[in-house]
């Protein structure tokens, strides 16, 4: 059955022309101190830019542990997700199944431990080829299951901030165990395998994330709250969170400059993995001169300007006349940029786009940033 997939309608006083409309019975006025998406929701978007990969076999955890920046063994502490540099890894689909492949209930054989990951769909073939190159003799099958599963995100209105649960609170109220409510499982998880929403492992404010069979609508998704993926992109841009190989360029991005340590994507005590030496050396030196920042594009009077800036545009500093950084992502009047911290917060509208000096760039300090990231470069004109 075809599903209506609207987007959100914002008040005329707020210009977000790149978003399509969502019909609402009554209009809503948004606080001048908050962005439209902070008050709209909870929303849900199917992330069509992501693809799902399955890891199956007794060596699945060991294999991933030696490749990724985070500690995959965290699944032994709680069933949920682990965020690594380029993708999200999901714990066993069956909650009674352990990381060693053992389990207490009916289902796949012990050797069929399954982990899933959602990855950047634009480089899916390259990711699969790289994973299989490193597989060697590991007992793990790596399969593209993008046709069978889709990645979804629920977000908006501080959906997950006040919950300490790893699972979506409404879904978690059903629960697994010796007295399983099968109708509850169907309502909250989508099917008997245990697909469910999990709190986004990066930041509470990002909401909940999950993978679900492609032929079903995930639980807790209301028809009038499903919205375009661009709204989720805007939500991330406003929070200063990059995702995917376009926003975190493969082969050249330094994980710590893209704030991945602050997003729970890097473990500094897990042991060896590919690329560990460079990341550990940068971390222990304690000097990060550039960081990824949320950006807002305005004119000389401070009015937001839309569709004026393209990714890879250079940001220059009026104070020094030098290049301050590069815009990595842009959508409407918002974006992300990798900027030198000593230039980012020197003064009001001191940054501009090279070749478009009438377009000013405001760097914004995210609320979730640790205070020690700004010891040497305290924000002067940043919007907290």
Image (cartoon, helix red, strand yellow):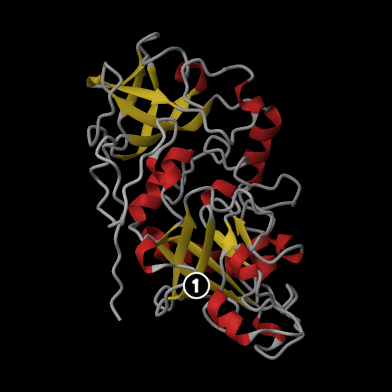
From the viewer's perspective, tell me whether residue 345 is left or right of residue 374. left
- The image quadrant that residue 81 belongs to is bottom right
Quadrant (top left/top right/bottom left/bottom right) for the N terminus: bottom left
| Front-lying residue, 141 or 239 | 239
The residue under the point 42% across, 67% down is 222
Mark 1 residue crowding within 10 angstroms, few (<14) / some (14–19) / many (20+): some
Residue 356: quarter of image: top left
Asked if 229 appears above or below 175 in the picture, the reply is: above
Left or right: residue 316 compared with residue 367: left
**In the depicted view, which residue is nearer to us: 37 or 128?**
37
Drawn side of residue 369 relative to residue 284, left or right? left
Total number of numbered labels?
1
Q: Position of residue 303 (x, y in %)?
A: 28, 24
Identify the residue at the far front of this view.
26
Front residue of 297/268: it is: 297
The residue labelled by disc 1 is: 219
Q: Looking at the image, which residue is at 42% across and 41% down?
A: 237
Percent across and percent down for residue 226 are 37, 63
The residue positioned 69% from the left and 67% from the top of the image is 79
Element marked by disc 1: loop
Q: As displayed, is residue 212 above or below residue 203?
A: below
Q: Position of residue 289 (x, y in %)?
A: 55, 24
Q: Quadrant of residue 170?
A: bottom right
Whether residue 166 is visible: yes
Residue drawn at the location 47% of the way across and 59% of the way down = 153
- Res 248 seen here: no
Q: Position of residue 321 (x, y in %)?
A: 35, 11
Residue furthest to the top:
319
Instruction: Classify 238 as above or below 352.
Output: below
């Amino acid at each position: 059955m075809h599903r209506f997939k609207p987007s959100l309608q914002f008040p005329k006083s707020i210009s977000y022309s790149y978003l399509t409309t969502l019909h609402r019975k009554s209009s809503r006025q948004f606080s001048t101190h908050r962005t439209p998406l902070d008050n709209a929701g909870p929303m849900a978007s199917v992330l069509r830019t992501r693809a799902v990969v399955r890891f199956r076999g007794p060596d699945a955890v060991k294999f991933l542990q030696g490749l990724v920046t985070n500690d995959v063994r965290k699944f032994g502490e709680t069933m949920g997700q682990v965020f690594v540099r380029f993708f999200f890894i999901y714990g066993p689909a069956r909650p009674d199944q352990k990381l060693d492949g053992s389990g207490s209930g009916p289902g796949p054989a012990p050797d069929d431990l399954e982990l899933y990951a959602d990855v950047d769909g634009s480089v899916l073939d390259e990711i699969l080829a790289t994973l299989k190159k490193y597989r060697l003799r590991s007992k793990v099958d790596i399969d593209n299951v993008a046709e069978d599963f889709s990645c979804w995100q629920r977000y908006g209105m501080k959906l997950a901030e006040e919950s300490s649960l790893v699972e979506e609170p409404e879904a978690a109220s059903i629960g697994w165990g010796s007295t399983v409510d099968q109708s509850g499982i169907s309502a909250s998880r989508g099917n008997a395998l245990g697909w469910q929403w999990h709190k986004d492992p990066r930041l509470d404010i990002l909401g909940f994330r999950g993978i679900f069979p492609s032929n079903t609508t995930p639980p807790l998704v209301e028809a009038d709250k499903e919205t375009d993926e661009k709204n989720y992109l805007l939500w991330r841009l406003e929070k200063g969170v990059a995702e995917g190989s376009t926003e975190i360029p493969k082969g050249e991005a330094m994980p710590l400059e893209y704030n991945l340590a602050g997003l729970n994507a890097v473990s500094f005590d897990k042991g060896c993995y590919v690329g560990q030496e460079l990341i550990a050396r940068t971390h222990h030196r304690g000097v990060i001169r550039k960081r990824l920042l949320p950006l807002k594009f305005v004119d000389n009077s401070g009015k937001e300007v839309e569709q004026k800036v393209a990714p890879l545009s250079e940001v220059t500093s009026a104070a020094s006349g030098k290049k301050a950084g590069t815009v990595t992502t842009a959508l409407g009047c918002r974006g992300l940029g990798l900027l030198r911290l000593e230039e980012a917060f020197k003064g009001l509208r001191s940054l501009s786009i090279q070749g478009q000096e009438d377009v000013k760039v405001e760097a914004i300090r995210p609320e979730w940033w640790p205070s020690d990231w700004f010891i040497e470069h305290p924000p002067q004109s940043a919007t907290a």
